[in-house]
Amino acid sequence: MKIIIVNGPNLNLLGKRENDIYGDETFNDFFETLQSKFKNVELEHYQSNIEGELIDKLQEVGYTYDGIILNAAAYTHTSVGIGDTVKAISTPVVEVHISNTFSREKFRHKSYISANAKGIILGFGLQSYELALMSFLSK
Ligand code: DQA
């Protein structure tokens, strides 16, 4: 089983970014723990701050991998392009957010990803990624 976590802008700053919302752990530390917990999964991680690079990565993996866990971060709320890619590819995408975007500003309530996602998990901190991963394993 081959799964990739694709993270969008500013998620490289986890651990030092708005800790009250996003927690204290770096994504790399979290990812190492996740990999060691799920040794039977070929788990990869890709992060970019650039919209087109995220689209390129989704296109690259989107016909061969078993699952994509996508946190498009701020692009969730703005990117028709990423939304179109999620619709175009055949690999199922689970949309993930660390925070509960519905309890935050109104502009975070809109998602261009959700309509074409297999499912959505948000508000559980970094555990949202683990829950998304488990959803692929239990099908
Ligand atoms: C986020 C929520 C987005 O609104 C925000 O722009 C992010 C992170 C989350 O994981 O909670 O950068 O996707």
Image: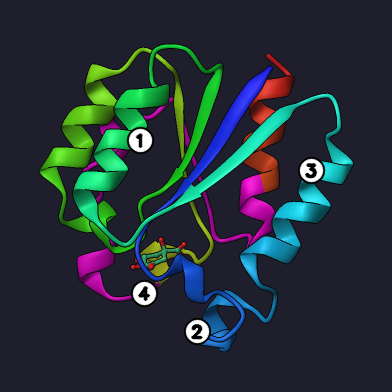
Outermost left residue? 80
Label whose residue precedes the other's in the sequence (1 or 3): 3
Q: Position of residue 86 (x, y in %)?
A: 29, 28
Is 110 magenta? The answer is yes
Q: Which mark is residue 57?
A: 1
Q: Is residue 10 left or right of residue 137?
A: left
- At x 36%, y 25%, the residue is 60
- Marked residue nearer the N-terminal end (3 or 2): 2
| Residue displayed at 57% across by 45% down | 45
Residue density around tag 4, few if under 14, some if 14–19, many if 20 or more, within 10 Å: few
Q: Which mark is residue 49?
A: none
* Mark 3 neighbour density, 10 Å: few (under 14) some (14–19) many (20 or more): some
Is residue 39 positioned above or below 128 on the image?
above
Q: CA distance from mark 1 to mark 4?
A: 28 Å
Q: Amino acid at mark 3?
A: Gln
Q: Residues within 10 Å of mark 2 (few under 14, many from 20)?
A: some
Can residue 96 be seen from the camera position used here?
yes
Camera-side residue of 126 and 111: 126
**Whole-number angstrom distance, CA of label 1 to CA of label 3:** 20 Å
For image coordinates 60% across by 28% down, the residue present is: 3
**Mark on residue 17?**
2
- Tally the marks: 4
Kindly report which numbered mark, 3 or 2, lies closer to the viewer in this rendering. 3
Q: How is the image coloured?
A: rainbow
Mark toward the viewer: 2 or 1: 1
Q: Which residue is mark 4?
A: 104
